[in-house]
Image: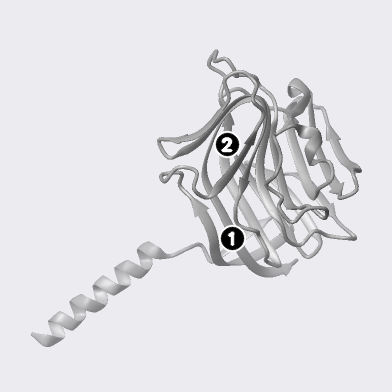
Amino acid sequence: MPCLKLQVLFFLVFCCLLSCKVPAEIKLNDIEFEQKELLFEDSFKNGLDKWVVEKEPVGTSEVYTKNGKMIIDVGGGSTVWFKEMIDKKNVLIQYKRRVVMKGGENDRLSDLNQFWMANDPHNPDIFSRSGSFAEYDPLQMYYAGIGGNRNTTTRFRKYLGNGERELIYDLTDKEYLLEPNKTYFIQILVSEGITKLFVDGTELFSYSDTKPLTKGYFGFRTVQSHQEIDEFRVYSLHGKSN
């Protein structure tokens, strides 16, 4: 009888391990990693306690959570910063995001934008702005704007910390622009001086930086848009380039 109980216990433990198993490896184009650690996540079930909202007081502008999603519904510029600094050698940031187009006041197909590895060399408090885009010029960070300028451009920039914004990619073909009400899976990789951005598993940008930004804050950015975000996760990775 004790042996039977022991076998049942082992079986239950085995089942538990299987159900908790995380994929051993992820591969993002030419860089392969073993997944080591989930650093941060947000299911947006507890409000915005992990975030700092900066938004211009234009029209009806709200940032809130509903049904396990972050809702950004703003008439002007807005940045929603994750409060925790990301400070790891190899990092993957990922989330799902869509631009809502259902005839609402702020429903405009534009500006699925994001900042990452952001720091303010002039002010230790990075969360000190009104949401106006020009106020972010003094930061050091990477920026990707998908479907900017009324869904006519998709750009990648590096902000140098002195007001200069270095333009690295400027894509205008339709395949790089937004579709209404489509949920996109965004992944941002920072590793060994390289940063990459993937949309639905396809590499959009890759930048090898001679002076890489290795730590900083992440923020969702948009202007006059209605967007939904969910399944936000940040992973620390380890692995090697092939």
Q: Position of residue 81 (x, y in %)?
A: 63, 45
Q: Amino acid at mark 1?
A: Tyr
Image quarter hosting the N terminus: bottom left
**Mark 1: which secondary structure?**
strand
The residue beneath circle 2 is 97
Q: Amino acid at mark 2?
A: Arg
The CA distance from mark 1 to mark 2 is 18 Å
Q: Is residue 183 visible?
A: no
Q: Residue at x 21, y 77 (%)?
A: 9
- In the rendered image, which quarter is residue 201 located in? top right
Image quarter hosting the C terminus: bottom right
Answer few, some or many: residues within 10 Å of disc 2's Cα (few below 14, many 20 plus, some between 14 and 19).
many
Q: On screen, 192 above or below 101?
A: below
The residue beneath circle 1 is 235
Question: Mark number for residue 23?
Answer: none
Left or right, 113 with reference to 18: right
Q: Residue at x 11, y 86 (%)?
A: 2
Q: Is residue 27 visible?
A: yes
Give the camera-side residue of 156 and 5. Answer: 156
Answer few, some or many: residues within 10 Å of disc 1's Cα (few below 14, many 20 plus, some between 14 and 19).
many
Q: On screen, 42 above or below 101?
A: below
Q: Position of residue 80 (x, y in %)?
A: 62, 41
| Total count of labels | 2
